[in-house]
Image (cartoon, rainbow, N blue to C red):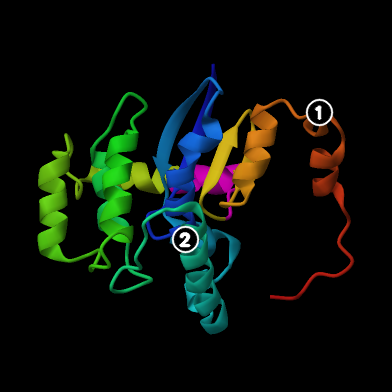
Amino acid sequence: MKQLRFWFDVISPYAYLAFERLPQVLQGHGVEVVYQPVLFAGLLAHWGQKGPAEIGPKRDWTYRQVAWLAHRHGIPMQLPAQHPFNPLALLRLGLACRGPFDTPNRWVCEQLMHHVWRGGADANDPQRLGELAQRLQPGLDPQGDEVKAALKAATARAAALGLFGVPTVEVDGRLFWGLDGLELLQGYLAGDPWFDGPAWDDAARQPSGIQRKP
């Protein structure tokens, strides 16, 4: 059985939509899914990028597009009261609910995602966070050093693997980025012969004609 790792940050609407669609994509394939929280801001800092919500026109397009995608796929979604927001409390809470792989199970991740992306409330409202923690009953202190170190280590590992965004699905050493990457993932799991050809590796060998100075 293949093990698939779903890297996500609850701040990303694409991660939420991909999380909701993943069971449909994996239907008929014998895979084991590990859900791995990671700090998206840490990946942005590593690669020297801005987040989509930090660029005005891109922010508008992102919210417009995810609203359409949610509508198209029949997934309930409302933007939280403030976005972007600091997701650390939620990511740490998830990691404090460790399962067999020292990561949260799907139910815990679902509670985190729905907390942010359903209802349109403030994701960091103290009362709501308290109610969520009471419901999840974490086995570790979400604000403890062990959990903080785990999130930091996961983010560093993600960057070392070459992750630059969320969601990213990792399987067999291959990385499938984004909601639209689920179509590639589905093809790979179905054994599409394209993946046996040179195109996947050739993409990384394409020479660059120009590099912009920092």
Q: Is residue 154 above or below residue 173?
A: below
Viewed as shown, does residue 52 lie left or right of 85?
A: right
Q: Is residue 34 above or below residue 157?
A: above
Going by the numbered disc 2, the residue's amino acid type is His
Q: Residues within 10 Å of mark 1 (few under 14, many from 20)?
A: few
Is residue 161 part of the magenta span, yes or no?
yes
Under circle 2, the secondary element is: helix
Residue at image point 23% right, 67% down:
121
Viewed as shown, does residue 118 lie left or right of 70?
A: left
Q: Are marks 2 and 1 in contact (CB under 8 Å)?
A: no
Quarter containing the N terminus: top right
Foreground residue, 130 or 27? Answer: 27
Residue 59 x %, y %: 50, 76
Going by the numbered disc 1, the residue's amino acid type is Pro
Secondary structure that dominates the magenta span: helix
Disc sitting over residue 71 in the figure: 2
Viewed as shown, does residue 132 lie left or right of 183?
A: left
Disc sitting over residue 178 in the figure: none
Is residue 86 part of the magenta span, yes or no?
no
Which residues lie in the magenta part? 155-164
Could one spot residue 162 in this view of the protein? Answer: no
Residue position marked by numbered label 1 in the rendering = 193
Residue at image point 13% right, 38% down:
137
Q: Residues within 10 Å of mark 2 (few under 14, many from 20)?
A: few
Foreground residue, 125 or 63? Answer: 63
Could one spot residue 163 in this view of the protein? Answer: yes
| Residue closest to the far bottom | 56
Residue depth check, mark 2 versus mark 1: number of the one nearer the observer = 2
Under circle 1, the secondary element is: helix
Residue 211 x %, y %: 80, 70
Residue at image point 63% right, 41% down:
175
Residue 149 x %, y %: 33, 44
